[in-house]
Image (cartoon, helix red, strand yellow):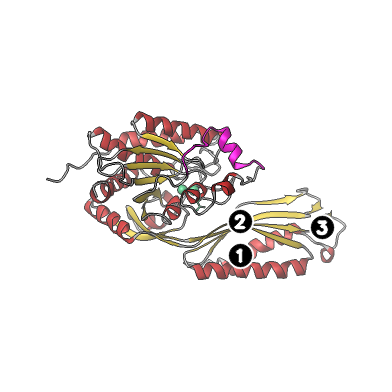
Amino acid sequence: MPEPTLALDAARLLADIRALGAVGADPGGGRTRIALSDADQAGRDLLVRWMRELGLQVHIDRIGNVFGILPGSGGGDARPLMIGSHIDTVRHAGALDGCYGVLAGLAVARAYRSAGRTPRRPIAVAAFTNEEGVRYQPDMMGSLVFAGGLSLDAALATVGTDGTRLGEELARIGYAGDLAPGAIAPHAYLELHIEQGPVLEAEGLQIGVVERLQGISWQRITVHGTANHAGTTPTRLRHDAGYAACAVVAFLREQVASAAPGSTLATTGSLRLAPDLINVIPRQATFTVDLRDPDEARLQAAEQQLADFLVQLAEREGVVIETERLARFAPVVFDAGLADAIEASARRLGCTHRRMTSGAGHDAQMVARIAPAAMIFVPSQGGISHNPREHTDDAQLVLGAQVLLDVVQHHLAAD
Ligand code: HGY
Ligand code: MN
Ligand code: MN
């Protein structure tokens, strides 16, 4: 006799999303909970309170990853089904990126609790530290340490863009746990996330079955030029760090990341000039380059094109150019069986769906190093994310969580 289908408390999930979204609220709309900030601490505290109210076993590991575990009936050795994401944000963020997946995981645990049911396999809800990587690079840091891809000591020693040391900030907010990263080894990992891109909405589809994730290359570039007077220095005598930086940004758009569909993507999200004065030719430019491509060979080619351009530019402009690698992750293929299970649940629930590749980085790409992992997407309105205007309709958010619960109930927690 099959177990009765569990019911999701949709109202509570939506309320949790709004309540967490209010933590670190910005005056002009949106919220900012940069990793290991006071606002991140407040978001963590709220999540831990909700986990405890649900009677989950709460564990914090030494890189600050938060786990809430619903025990299973299958004996202590059963490795948990892990449902995770992150609750740290970029600056002026939306309320859904990462938070949706963590809170949907809570909703799954709540569905079991409300029905008085115990899954055969434990269910671990995870919130990974510093997924965004905007203060401390690389991104997906907590899940990378969890998966053994970065040593705990190296992560704790990371110096942020604000000069702070990650380990000290983690201790300051009270989330330097004692659990060894990776001690909770997942049987499988699921991550529900907003698409953050335009595909599902453009095709009028409800669910993305995410079977792969594109490669990511982050570097910081510093150009050392010569400060000089804006009014007296002829162009031919300039060693203008600001011009050099802008030449790189233009090169990336025109030569590397064309508008052709499927091309490599290039972004310079941060650019600082010194001395940053209207009438002084910049002596220094420090900027970031984020390259993304689902094809590893093409991503490497883009990196090489950039490196070659920097050599020519330095020669031509008489500047010195230094590069520092901040993150480099090859494209990831998720677990085919899990992707099939997600597709089967989407179909069972009558959702329109498609297979897709994730443009954004996610904790799932790190956990995939140590366990079968896959993701479920719901549409993003206008494809907007990393922006207070990030939005997905309530009905879509609930549907995505119902697909997640269906995968758990029919494919994972029972096995
Ligand atoms: O950069 C990313 O794709 C993710 O938001 N950390
Ligand atoms: Mn995210
Ligand atoms: Mn993000």
Q: Quick one: label 1, few (<14), some, or many (20+) residues within 10 Å?
A: many
Tag 2: amino acid? Thr
- Residue pointed to by mark 3: 226
Whether residues under marks 1 and 2 lie with C-beta atoms below 8 angstroms apart, the answer is: yes
User: SS of the residue at dot 1?
Assistant: helix
For marks 1 and 2 on the same chain, the one whose residue lies earlier in the sequence: 1
CA distance separating discs 3 and 2: 22 Å
Q: Nearer the viewer, residue 350 or 366?
A: 366
Residue 239 placed where, x, y %?
Answer: 80, 61
The percent position of residue 330, horizontal first and vertical second, equals 49, 62
Residue furthest left in the image: 1
**Within 10 Å of the Cα at label 2, are there few (<14), some (14-19), or many (20+) other Cα atoms?**
some
Q: CA distance from mark 3 to mark 1?
A: 24 Å
Asked if residue 48 lies in the magenta stretch, the reply is no
Residue at position x 57%, y 47% from top? 153
Can the viewer see residue 37 in this picture?
Answer: no
Q: Position of residue 375 (x, y in %)?
A: 37, 53
Mark 1: amino acid? Leu
Mark earlier in primary sequence (3, 2): 3
Which quarter of the rendered picture does the N terminus lie within? top left
On residue 252, which mark appears?
1
Hey, what amino acid is under mark 3? Thr
Q: Nearer the viewer, residue 249 or 139?
A: 139
Q: Position of residue 377 (x, y in %)?
A: 37, 52
Above-or-below relation of 269 to 17: below
Helix, strand, or loop for circle 3? loop
> Which stretch did the figure color magenta?
163-180
Residue 268 got which mark? 2
Q: Is residue 324 left or right of residue 43?
A: right
